[in-house]
């Protein structure tokens, strides 16, 4: 998939691609997914609709890739030697302002995803699955180090726990998730459920 | 609050109240919160708008109370003698069909809550706070029995964990939460994070 996607997108520079994703996210924040049109994206970015469709196939994939592009860091370069270190480093990748923006964006998109199978499929491909794969690599290293037992049933629910901390924070506490909150949540919930060390 | 509310509502029978809440939930499912009007509720239930406003004050409180009314069971009569027993019994209070309906309803309302401080306030008063109070009573009994340490930091996050299991299930697994899933999640995540027994 990655090679094909790169080939398809080979005619625009990374700078231009980033600029385009920024414009898509701005439009998303302004009007929401349902009201977002490829016409508006074309106008805002001074591209032709034909180019947008050729490069991205459609609105759902364009939006999913824009959101993915906007996610800071990720696990790619993280390998601290402990599960706690890795999860903390991941949290510290986004500052509180980025987390608040991303939380508002995801809230809007979570609604659009239901009732839109195409958007859900694009989200799974470009956001959920890559993120789950990254979590699994981090967890596999923890298993290999002997920090987490390979048969611990919580391994399947790491994404559920993290999404819970992230989403319930705004509902229950009426605050966007912050680094401080998420670090506390990881230590209080995620690591103990996995039977991993909560200090170090 | 409860006494005042009961007094305010004293002129309608519990049957009539239940009928009214059902109609509100039907309308919610049909048109969503934003498009729901007190006129439509009055027409559907053959009540006067004046009555609705006198009894409930407004749309936000009427909707929050209707959702609360619809939640089956709750913790009220649950006291099985173990934390695992209590949490399992709570889950078994709703069958899979009720959970699917309630999950769809909450998804729609979660969007409306943001950008609507009045609805958020009504939700906190009639749904989130009573539910948190019930969780705290269940947890307090577990602490009193010596099942959970009083200073376990996961105690503050029980609602976050549960909401995570409930909400992420539909996003990641594209399925409504089921009893079987939630029982597994409680055993794999919630009880271990609290340091409580996962069998018995």
Image: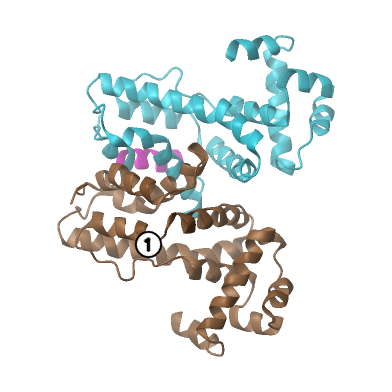
Chain colours: A brown, B cyan
Vertical comparison of B6 with A65: above or below? above
Q: Is residue B164 visible?
A: yes
Which residue is rendered at x = 57% and y = 82% of the image?
Answer: A16
Of all chains, the one bearing label 1 is A
Left or right: where does residue A3 sit relative to residue B51? left
Vertical comparison of A27 with A151: above or below? below
Relative image position of residue A200 (x, y in whole percent)? 18, 52
Instruction: Please state, as top left, top right, bottom left or bottom right, where the C terminus of chain B lies in the image.
Output: top left
Which of the two residues, B60 or B186, is positioned nearer the viewer here?
B60
Report which quarter residue A24 is drawn in. bottom right
Relative image position of residue B181 (x, y in whole percent)? 41, 43
Mark 1 neighbour density, 10 Å: few (under 14) some (14–19) many (20 or more): some
In reply to whether residue B184 is colored magenta, the answer given is yes
Relative image position of residue B129 (x, y in whole percent)? 50, 27
Which of the two residues, B21 or A56, is positioned nearer the viewer here?
A56
Magenta residues span B178-188
Which residue is rendered at x = 57% and y = 26% of the image?
Answer: B125
The residue that label 1 is drawn on is A93
């Amino acid at each position: 998939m990655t090679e094909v996607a790169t080939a398809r997108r080979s005619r625009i520079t990374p700078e231009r691609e980033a600029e385009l994703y920024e414009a898509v996210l701005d439009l998303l924040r302004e009007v929401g997914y349902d009201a977002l049109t490829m016409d508006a994206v074309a106008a805002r970015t001074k591209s032709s609709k034909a180019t947008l469709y050729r490069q991205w196939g459609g609105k759902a994939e364009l939006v999913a890739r824009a959101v993915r592009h906007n996610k800071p860091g990720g696990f790619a370069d993280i390998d601290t030697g402990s599960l706690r270190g890795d999860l903390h480093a991941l949290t510290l990748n986004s500052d509180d302002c980025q987390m608040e923006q991303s939380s508002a964006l995801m809230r809007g998109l979570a609604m659009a995803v239901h009732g839109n199978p195409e958007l859900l499929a694009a989200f799974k491909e470009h956001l959920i699955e890559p993120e789950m794969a990254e979590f699994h690599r981090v967890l596999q290293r923890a298993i290999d180090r002997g920090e987490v037992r390979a048969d611990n049933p919580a391994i399947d629910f790491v994404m559920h726990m993290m999404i819970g901390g992230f989403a319930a924070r705004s509902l229950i506490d009426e605050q966007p998730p912050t680094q401080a909150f998420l670090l506390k949540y990881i230590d209080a919930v995620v690591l103990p459920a996995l039977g991993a060390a909560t200090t170090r």
